[in-house]
Image: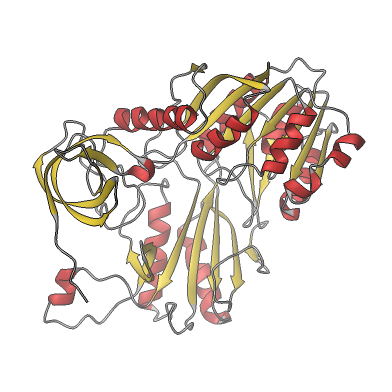
Amino acid sequence: MRKKKNIILENIKLTTAGAKGVSIGKTDDGKTVIVSGAVPGDVVNARVRKSKSKYYEAEAVSFIELSPDRVSPECTHFGVCGGCKWQNLSYNKQLEFKQNEVLNNIRRIGGIDDFQTLEILGSAQQYFYRNKMEFSFSDARWLTSEEINAENEISNKNALGFHIPGMWSKILDLKECYLQESPSNEIRLAVKQYADEHHLDFFDVKNQEGFLRTLMLRQNSRGEWMVLFQFFREEQDSREALFAYLLECFPQIKTLVYAINSKNNDSVYDLDIKTFFGKGYLMEEMDGLKFKIGPKSFFQTNYRQALELYRKTLEFADLKGDEVVYDLYTGTGTIAQYVARKAKKVIGIEAVQEAIDAATEHAALNGLDNCTFYCGDMKDIFTADFLEKHPPADVLITDPPRDGMHTKVVEQILKLAPKRIVYVSCNSATQARDLALMKGQYKVEKILPVDMFPQTHHVENIALLTQK
């Protein structure tokens, strides 16, 4: 077997950002180089990992010149943790590259050029913006090269933190995290310390055994907290002692719930959640609308920026009060109810029954009797037969998952022919693909990128379409 050559590309000037936060430059002969481990503006030597006919994939191994847009990362785990990969890039540049990514996708993939571009809506909070965090316990934490090479034997390999990218069985033991406000770090560290001192078993991923499995921390905008534990097995005395300790130390915890999970995965959605303390849920409010947030509830993790996103969606919909609005991929009906106060009727469709149940409950809670929700796979329920049985839409709002909309769904939208479409997307590439399918019948009037996740490459986009 031939050994791969160790090819180093020298003096590569990185000029822009690419998909998933990589940086892009060119060799002297014009071949594109996609580089990880650097930021635009850096000049690097990069080791080739993959060589394609039109480009190289490489990683930075040394820096000839540092970008003027570099900043010092806040977190001590930067570079190891797979989370906030753009902490070393100024926030203004993050926004610039995110906006450019959306524009390039719509123009290149969508083949659409004639539209108004609104300036990207940045997040007022660049750190501590998440209201939900999930951590894993492990008895085999990720070790640094210094620890591995040290002569001293490591007695405690317990960890509570995040999975190392590409190494699912290894957990980074978090000392700090800048994603969720206090007392998130304090609660997590207190749990870890208590578990170590009381010799509670941390989960063994490979052998599927142990006691402590996962920890989820959730908060609302009023500073009330939910704590959810997953245990691999029941140890009632140990569990209740841990819970009593946490409730004594952290009065901010308003509900404490748990599940026994002996499955081979950490998914919470098919588990029986038990309430130890409190009501088992938190209440959230957005511009006068109330939402019940349980341990399984989907709710935007950046509350403040989600509120701005919903306000802009309502603004794009431009409702006068007499319209029928369809809300596709409605989830728990947050957008549907947000627009319902300005509409005659809202019809929401979603594939997950639990989400539909929550949407119906929230509509009743908010006194909205003009919302009707239907459950089913979008391509199977949003059909010609469905459209025949319901009033035609004046405005359609769609907020699909990252894969975008099925072609059958796009076909039905074109048959439904609403006057306005507001397309909210977390993946502008698949959004652009869908817009291309509709551009014969609809004009893209304007787009508004929205930054929901600072310090990452992710970006949302709202597009307004009107009938030609």
Q: Is residue 259 visible?
A: yes
Query: Which of the pair 382/453 is nearer the observer?
Result: 382
- Residue under the point 19% across and 73% down: 2
Q: Is residue 362 visible?
A: no
Query: Which of the pair 370/377 is nearer the observer?
Result: 377
Residue 440, by quadrant, is top right
Say above or below: 166 vs 464.
below
- Residue under the point 16% across and 35% down: 67
Left or right of residue 367: residue 431:
left
Q: Position of residue 126 (x, y in %)?
A: 37, 36
Outermost residue on the left side: it is 64
Say above or below: 103 vs 236.
above
Q: Position of residue 457 (x, y in %)?
A: 38, 41
Say above or below: 119 vs 277.
above
Count how many numbered circles sit on residues in the image.
Answer: 0
Outermost residue on the front side: it is 53
- Residue under the point 74% across and 30% down: 414
Which image quarter is the N terminus in?
bottom left
Its colouring scheme is secondary structure
Q: Position of residue 235 (x, y in %)?
A: 55, 82
Say above or below: 437 vs 233.
above
Q: Position of residue 286 (x, y in %)?
A: 63, 33
Left or right of residue 280: residue 13:
left
- Residue under the point 13% across and 44% down: 44
Query: Which of the pair 115/165 is nearer the observer?
Result: 115
Which image quarter is the C terminus in?
top right
Outermost residue on the right side: it is 389
